[in-house]
Image (cartoon, rainbow, N blue to C red):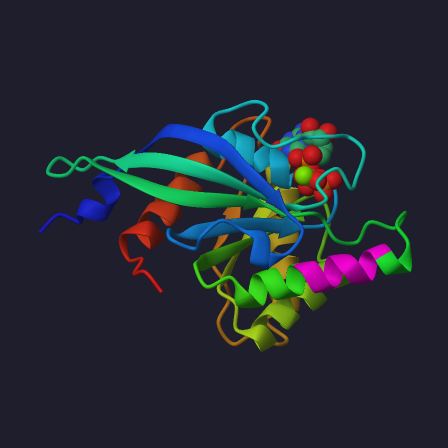
């Protein structure tokens, strides 16, 4: 039997901004699978969302860290088209504010922590949290600490190493290895991971394939 999964190509039919929420309670009804993007300020979360859905300006991008402040929902309609089936699937992409941004007050950082923790832990349709880390650097303590915290909370996540266009491939490979080594101190099984460049559109298909697979196995909470 050929493996049908590899024949599936996701086509994005539409992507639209729905709303920005200050708490998980304000988020849209949890009636479809949801994927959120998190990571340090400026790591490229909003750029990656735009690259995945093929829109330049859906999520707001900025060279100034701290641009994304709220929980931003985008409704995506896609079609995964193996030969037998042409079915529309609706899902949410969520752009989250970055962590590790130095130029904010302690109070603002605490607010961020509370908002994100309750969103991550209570959002029942959150299927996968994509944790982005900059491929130009080795493992950053703030990322490792955040991922270890996800383990304690038992949140399903995958890693994305961003901005690979800014590095030589050998350096990216080295940084990925170092990152995984740092994780293996606390983790027996390592997470799925992806390499991306929003500038070069690298990583789009593997990420969309991964989401397709998760959408297919999604069961409403
Ligand atoms: P915050 O919302 O502030 O937390 O930032 P963010 O993580 O959403 O980052 P954003 O997508 O706004 O990108 C930050 C900067 O990095 C922008 O100047 C982008 O153009 C740039 N950038 C993002 N992804 C890439 C990439 O893959 N390659 C290159 N060369 N630049 C990128
Ligand atoms: Mg952003």
Q: Which residue of the protein is positioned furthest toward the top in this rendering?
A: 56
Q: Quadrant of the C terminus?
A: bottom left
Task: Say how many tags the image has.
Answer: 0
Q: Is residue 34 above or below residue 63?
A: below
Write down which quadrant ligand 1 falls in: top right
Residue 184: image quadrant is bottom right
Indicate yes or no whether the magenta region holds residue 165.
no
* Horizontal side, residue 201 vs residue 78: left or right: right
Residue at the spot x=60%, y=68% of the render?
Answer: 150
In front here: 155 or 94? Answer: 94
In front here: 195 or 143? Answer: 143
Give the magenta part as a residue range.
Answer: 108-115
Please provide percent x and percent y for residue 149. 65, 71
Indicate yes or no whether the magenta region holds residue 114.
yes
Please provide percent x and percent y for residue 114. 72, 64
Looking at the magenta stretch, what is its main secondary structure? Answer: helix
Residue at the spot x=38%, y=53% of the render?
Answer: 31
Residue at the spot x=72%, y=54% of the render?
Answer: 138
Residue at the spot x=72%, y=48% of the render?
Answer: 98
Q: Is residue 128 visible?
A: yes
Please provide percent x and percent y for residue 197. 58, 34
């Amino acid at each position: 039997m050929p493996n049908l999964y590899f024949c599936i190509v996701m086509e994005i039919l539409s992507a639209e901004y729905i709303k920005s929420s200050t708490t998980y309670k304000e988020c849209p009804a949890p009636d479809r699978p949801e994927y959120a993007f998190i990571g340090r300020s400026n790591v490229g979360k909003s750029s990656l969302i735009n690259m995945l859905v093929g829109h330049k300006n859906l999520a707001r991008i900025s060279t100034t860290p701290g641009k994304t402040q709220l929980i931003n929902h985008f409704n995506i309609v896609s079609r995964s088209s193996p030969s037998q089936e042409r079915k529309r699937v609706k899902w949410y992409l969520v752009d989250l504010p970055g962590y590790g941004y130095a130029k904010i007050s302690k109070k603002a950082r605490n607010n961020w922590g509370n908002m994100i923790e309750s969103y991550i832990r209570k959002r029942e349709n959150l299927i996968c949290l994509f944790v982005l880390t900059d491929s130009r650097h080795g493992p950053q303590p703030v990322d490792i600490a955040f991922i270890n915290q996800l383990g304690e909370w038992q949140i399903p996540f995958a890693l994305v190493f961003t901005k690979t266009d800014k590095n030589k491939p050998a350096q990216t490979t080295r940084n990925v290895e170092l990152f995984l080594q740092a994780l293996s101190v606390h983790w027996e099984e390592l997470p799925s991971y992806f390499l991306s460049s929003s500038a070069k559109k690298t990583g789009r298909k593997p990420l969309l394939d991964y989401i397709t697979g998760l959408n297919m196995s999604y069961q409403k909470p």
